[in-house]
Image: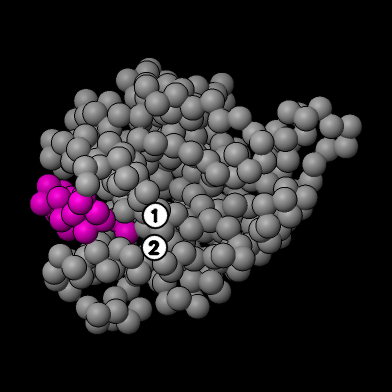
Amino acid sequence: MQTSWGDIEVSDAHVHFFSYGFFSALASQRSALRGAATAESPESIAQMLGWTPPPAEPEALATLWVRELDRWGVRRAALIASVPGDEQATAAAVGRYPERFYGYFMLNPLAPDTAERLRKALEGGKLQTVCLFPAMHRFPMQDEAVKAVLDLAAACAGTAVFVHCGVLTVGVRAKLGLPSAFDMRFSDPIDLHAVALAYPKLKFIVPHFGAGYFREALMLCDLCPNVYLDTSSSNSWTRYQPEGQDLATVFRRALDVAGAGRLLFGTDSSYLPRGWNSAIFESQSSALRQIGVSAPDARRIFGENLQQLLAR
């Protein structure tokens, strides 16, 4: 991609893969909530949201995303299976386009089939980042169930662990009238401190700069060199910061503490027809230009770090 720093190979560390299975899960939840005699369909859910219904085959959806990334000049993207149990859809996308996608998948450590599901996902070789959402699934990072997940992840070379901290809202659920019984008691990045120290060879990713827990995320990064920050989303959490602490200030402080080698550019793109959220790229590029980031550091942040982190 041509930028003010020259030609940069951009890789997006945060793209949600809203597959047919994702919409099926929402349809089932909405039907159960409403007690409807006629079940909702994935197509009807997409239409309610004003989105394009995805193809039933994940490989076909992957092709649409490849075309979308090509349109913007994006080299690779990390695709996130965004409901537990949908990991095979993302694995299929990575299997079709291994040179374009990395595979992430959401896992609930408290679910009864977690160990079997995790082992199967990692042994397949197409998925390499486990996504944990403590506030969503209501567990502390010190839980024994989490330790079992981390033990398995650490035993599989090239595996990373994504841990969502801070404010968590799922707009699609609100639009569909679905409850979001999240618990922010489990959202503090500091909860990851002892865990990251206990698994020094395992790489951890905290998205959205900690999503409101920016100070705590910086403390975590300062103490744990195996923790990375993903820069994705509009970062609207900055409205909780003291006046004047804009995105440029956030980047400057993150660079001071974590360095350019532990920041992973991401957009939080998700649905079609919007596709890849170029506005996020532009706002982050503008912030980095404002603080005078060098071309080598821009290349690291916008792609090289992710490629090195997940290289196999």
What is the crowding at mark 1: few (fewer than 14 residues within 10 Å), some, or many (at least 20)? some
Nearer to us in this view, 280 or 298: 280
Q: Which mark is residue 22?
A: none
Residue at 50% from the left image edge and 78% from the top image edge: 71
Q: Secondary structure at mark 2?
A: helix
Q: CB of mark 1 within 8 Å of CB of mark 2?
A: yes
**x 53%, y 71%: residue:** 68
Position of residue 6 measured from the top left corner of the image (x, y, whole percent) = 24, 82
Q: Secondary structure at mark 1?
A: loop
From which residue to which does the magenta span run?
A: 244-265
Residue 124: x and y in percent read 51, 47
**Does residue 135 appear to the left or right of 251 in the view shown?**
right
**Farthest left residue in view:** 256
Residue at image coords 56%, 36%: 84
Residue 32 located left or right of residue 239 = right
Q: Looking at numbered disc 1 in the image, what kind of residue is underneath it?
A: Ser
Which residue matches tag 1? 234
The numbered mark at residue 280 is: 2
Q: Principal SS element in the magenta part? A: helix
Q: Position of residue 125 (x, y in %)?
A: 46, 50
Outermost front residue = 243
